[in-house]
Amino acid sequence: MGIKILTEHINVPGIETLEVYRKHGGYRSVEKALKTMSPDEVVEEVKTSGLRGRGGAGFPTGMKWSFLAKPEGVPRYLVCNADESEPGTFKDRYFMEKTPHSLIEGMITSSYALGANTSYIYIRGELMFVLRILEKAIAEAYAAGLLGKNILGSGYDLDLHVAPGGGAYICGEETALLESLEGKRGNPRNKPPFPAVKGLFASPTVVNNVESIASVPWIVNNGGAEYAKIGIGRSTGTKLFSCSGNINKPGVYEIELGVPVEEFIYSDEYCGGIWKGKQLKAVVPGGSSVPILPANLITKTAAGEDRLMTYESLSDGGFVSGSMLGSGAFIVFDEDQCIVRNTWNYARFYHHESCGQCSPCREGTGWMEKVLHRIEHGHGHQQDIDLLVSVAKQIEGNTICPLGDAAAWPVASAIRHFRDEFEWHIKHPKEAILPGAVYRGQLATIEA
Amino acid sequence: MAKITFDGIEVEVEDGTTILQAARKIGGSVVPPAMCYYTPLKGSGGKCRVCLVKVTQGSAKDPRPMPKLVASCITPVQDGMVVENTTNEDVLNARKGIVEMLLINHPLDCPICDQAGECDLQDLSYEHGVSATRYEEERRKFNKIDLGPYIQLHMTRCILCYRCVYTADQITANRVHGVLGRGDAAEIGTYIENVIDNDFSGNVIDVCPVGALTDKTWRFKNRVWFTKPMDAHRDCPTCSGKVTLWTRGEEVLRVTARKDQYNEVEEFICNTCRFDKKETKDWTIEGPRHIERNSVISANHYELPVLNVPIVPNLPSSTKKNLPQE
């Protein structure tokens, strides 16, 4: 087992209470930062650590913080993006449910670094029970003087609020999140201006993922340089992976970035191999929006090197033969899973979740879903495959926010790598609609 | 002041101007189309994506190109920026794709639509669309929504530009309609049956780029291209009273605000002028209105695109070239 930063004490009974959490070294970073460090020093430490945003885009957190505009007399805000709704991702939910104080500690330290006196945790509306856990923990922190006026006698004030969303995937996009937090319809904003200049209530705002914020206390306690030693190259630190699909041990795993993908799938320490000893067919390594990779390309890059669980290695080969680390939702498919059905399922999700603001995404997601629905249900035409590729291309890059890209990539990559499976569905509609029917390569044997 | 090169043409504009406004300063066929952006409405733009352009040089200081196509209506210019619109194949292809997207759920009922002849979407699809559709699925349908005695809403024709929402927000006292639902189920509506009744509510008809919001006092009376536009004014206590009358013979069939070549109103007008003053004696006629705007119908160009913009492949970036003239 490698080093654990986020989940070290996660299984300690009562860790959700302040008392137990402090016993295990909790809130040390708040004392250290507020009493001995200046805000800029904290930002510097985070920059040195090389911590990259854990929400999906992988943008360096320290860099994001240093972009924050600091005009006089204007409040600044830190918003924690806990609107985790990407299919396959459940790491933040697990983390907040188990150790709410870790997030609160991270929020205090990060808010101090950014000079924010009011911070928000925007949590997904479906996670009301986690919201209650967080609110209870926040009340404890207020009572202990860790939140509110003059925290630990340092003269720094911070108010922390938890705000639930209404259950829209789009509100995980940072500007839509801010709109929603302001009480408006959750439509993404046009950029520029970026949130770092004009975010929440038209003030400079930083929006960070739960995991990014929760990594800050460790960095403050142990130093950024120490954090940078963990991991490989520019992928520093540890990362939570939400593993699901046909594996023996689905769940949330914290790993040091740099573990080989093959080891991650088959080692008993992590996923524990494919369920019932079946063959691996494909993996979506970073949540439903990243390109799907077939078995041969997920374990080895196109150049034949071992693929590692890092930002760089997973995206090696670009969109032709690579994918992305994304939010760390590792979805594994065995030989009995139908890629067409799965792609349709994803397309259906993006169709449902498109906000409808800009035309390529509003119309294109629905179009792709309908075509995939047809193919899956035995009414496809041969030209539909090229049509899907073309529609995906028309959406990609032409939308206001990344939801358009997220909808286009899974479709485009599934066709790129599993085109014969789509063709088989179209050529053999009667077999393809049988329950459990799966295409198995050139010598297809159908299991009904 | 910022100097930019747009399609090989240099133009100097105020700092903070958008790329689209800079292009409009040049004028002619290089101007990107705009379906959702509307100069008099603050905050509009960025939604329809038909005005996408390629920025091949960000600014004189930072000459890197912008990675994606940008919406020209909301992107401010930088000194030394180089922008390609009609000279870039990617831009024209992307625009073609977006026009296709706008049309897949559009009913294409132009023959019975009152907007035909002055419809932005109609013009745009002749310029950039394709003649056949690849969409075989069912189109989305909505029930007609009654918005009171003056305005008819046909949601099926709507392209969700949000212009009418901004209009109601910015020039009327209180907005009673908005966008409900999301994705392709999003619709303009009042949620609880409500009448859009306000001195300036009729302006939502003028800003609508398609036939989604039409004037009930004019519906099915005549076709736009059979009527004669006349500039006229009256002494109106609520608005400027400067309008365009659309007449046939002695009859005033409809009254609209005066619109420029980009279909943007010069001044918003009140409902009394628009709906109640339908007699020539109510107005002081100034003379025929010169309509600068090209329309597929007024130009009688059914068979050919209005502006047949040629796609020039592999054009070296920022080359000055002879642009197609109107």
Image (cartoon, rainbow, N blue to C red):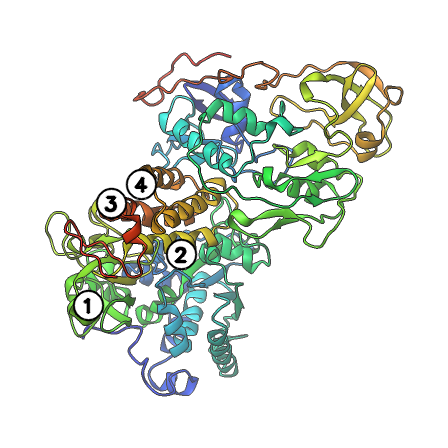
**Is residue A133 at all visible to an observer of this figure?**
yes
Q: Nearer the viewer, residue A334 or B96?
A: A334
- CB atoms of marks 2 and 1 within 8 Å: no
Instruction: Name which of mark 3 and mark 1 comes first in the sequence.
Output: 1
Q: Are marks 3 and 4 on the same chain?
A: yes
| Disc 3 residue type (three-letter) | Arg
Q: Residues within 10 Å of mark 4 (few under 14, many from 20)?
A: many
The numbered mark, 2 or 4, whose residue comes first in the sequence reads 2
Alpha carbon separation for disc pair 4 and 1: 30 Å
Badge 4 or badge 1: first in the primary sequence: 1
Amino acid type of the residue that numbered disc 4 sits on in the rendered structure:
Ile
Q: Dot 3 corresponds to which residue?
A: A419
Q: Chain of mark 4?
A: A
* Residue ID for mark 1: A274
Look at the image and tell me in which quarter the C terminus of chain A lies. bottom left
Q: What is the secondary structure assignment of the residue under circle 4?
A: helix
Q: Is residue A251 left or right of residue B28?
A: left
Which mark, by number, is residue A65? Answer: 2
Q: Nearer the viewer, mark 2 or mark 1?
A: 1
